[in-house]
Image (spheres, helix red, strand yellow):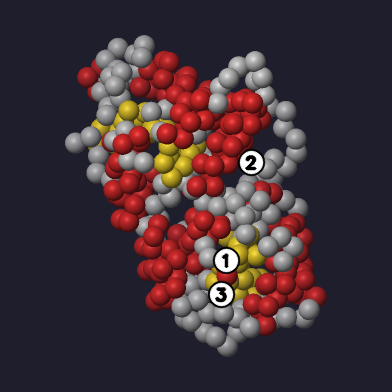
Amino acid sequence: MKRVLILEPYYGGSHKLFLTGLQKTVTADYTLLTLPARKWKMRMQLSAFWFIQEIMKFPEQGRNFDTVLCSTFVDVAILRSQLILIPGWNRNTHICTYFHENQFVYPGQTVDPTIRQFTAINFTTAMASDSCAFNSRYNLESFLNAVSSSLKKATDMRLSFCVDEIRNKSVVLYPGMDYSSVDQAEPDVKNTNDGPPVILWNHRWEHDKGPELFFNALYFIQKNKIDFRLIVMGESFMKKPECFEEALGRLEKEIIHFGYAESREEYSKLLHQCDVIVSTAKHEFFGISVLEGIRAGCYPLLPADLSYPELYDVEYLYKPGKLGKRLLDFMKKPIQLKKETAQALTSLFEWNVCKTNYKEFLFVNAREIL
């Protein structure tokens, strides 16, 4: 059986969900080294050294792996330079990196003068990896375009070959989805059509998910005296946008649920109570929460931008400045998403569908599977 060492310094949220599904789906002997999902900048700068110390604790005969799988919060260039110094380490071990995100196009709330060191780590990680996988075509192309632009600034060095090198060893692998908890919750929720439509927003409570735009669209509907109900979920942190506190007061009569769902079971049941799922993301490389909402029967209203155009038909997308009108039109004439449509929109991303591609990524050189 193939031996895989997983290095994840940000073990939480979508990263944790991804690795849980991978280990259930692709048969291998896994060893998992993780750190909690916090202090992402420190993780990118220092986690490689921590992982080296942990690997050195393995018995020498236990340091022989077929594959090392990293996320982009690992500085793979540093990792690789240190691995070759470990006694018993197999220098032919295949090192893969899965790009859940890239720092080049992350929309910072304020100008961050330190961001270049993290984009540089993304770049050198891609160069030092044997294979790279990106969770959407948008993620891959935005990364390569940004790398190309960055390298052109080195006017006295010709480095365009780096872009081709990264592209040649990269593939697009959508994250595998496990809808079991969503599917199991359906019989427990009564489908009643006699109440007003329920709007769903189930994203992280951070500025890059555009919550101000979402709540402004709801205030627009309120102003037009259209009745609706609201479920807001998602992970929040110590610092969250002030618009959530304002919305809690202004939308008090419409709110069914407002806050983190404490279990997958509760989360899935709440999804099934909703009629339409809205994204206002400024930053989205894939969108797991949107797929979960669609699976539960929610009609999607999504930006005509980021990763969404490659995943969804134009009928589900809204142009900049048009969310309020699109949502108002939906409220006046709700569209029920048929079960077969929900299945068609979501089934492509199930783990059992993409299993073979992940096996090839982990155990075959990427150049052989493009």
From this view, report whether residue 196 is shown above or below residue 362: below
- Crowding at mark 2 (Cα within 10 Å: few <14, some 14-19, many 20+): some
Numbered disc in front, either 2 or 1: 1
Amino acid marked by disc 3: Asp
Position of residue 254 measured from the top left corner of the image (x, y, whole percent): 68, 74
SS label for mark 2: loop
Residue at the image point whose x is 72% and y is 66% from the top: 322
| Left-right relation of 191 to 352 | right
| Left-right relation of 85 to 100 | left
Q: Mark 3 and mark 1: span between their CA atoms?
A: 19 Å
- Crowding at mark 3 (Cα within 10 Å: few <14, some 14-19, many 20+): many
- Labels 2 and 3: the sequence-earlier one: 2
Position of residue 108 measured from the top left corner of the image (x, y, whole percent): 69, 40
Residue at the image point whose x is 30% and y is 25% from the top: 93
SS label for mark 3: loop
From the image, tell me which residue sits under label 2: 106
Amino acid marked by disc 1: Val
Identify the image quadrant of the C terminus.
Answer: top left
Q: Where, by quadrant of the figure, is residue 183 drawn? A: bottom left
Residue at the image point whose x is 32% and y is 40% from the top: 369
Q: Mark 2 and mark 3: span between their CA atoms?
A: 30 Å
Identify the image quadrant of the N terminus.
Answer: top left
Q: In the image, which disc is placed on residue 314?
A: 1
| Left-right relation of 130 to 35 | left
| Residue 351 appears in the picture as rendered | yes
From this view, report whether residue 213 is shown above or below residue 114: below
- Crowding at mark 1 (Cα within 10 Å: few <14, some 14-19, many 20+): some
SS label for mark 1: helix
Q: Residue furthest bottom?
A: 194
From the image, tell me which residue sits under label 3: 275
Q: Where, by quadrant of the figure, is residue 224 drawn? A: bottom right
Residue at the image point whose x is 73% and y is 69% from the top: 324
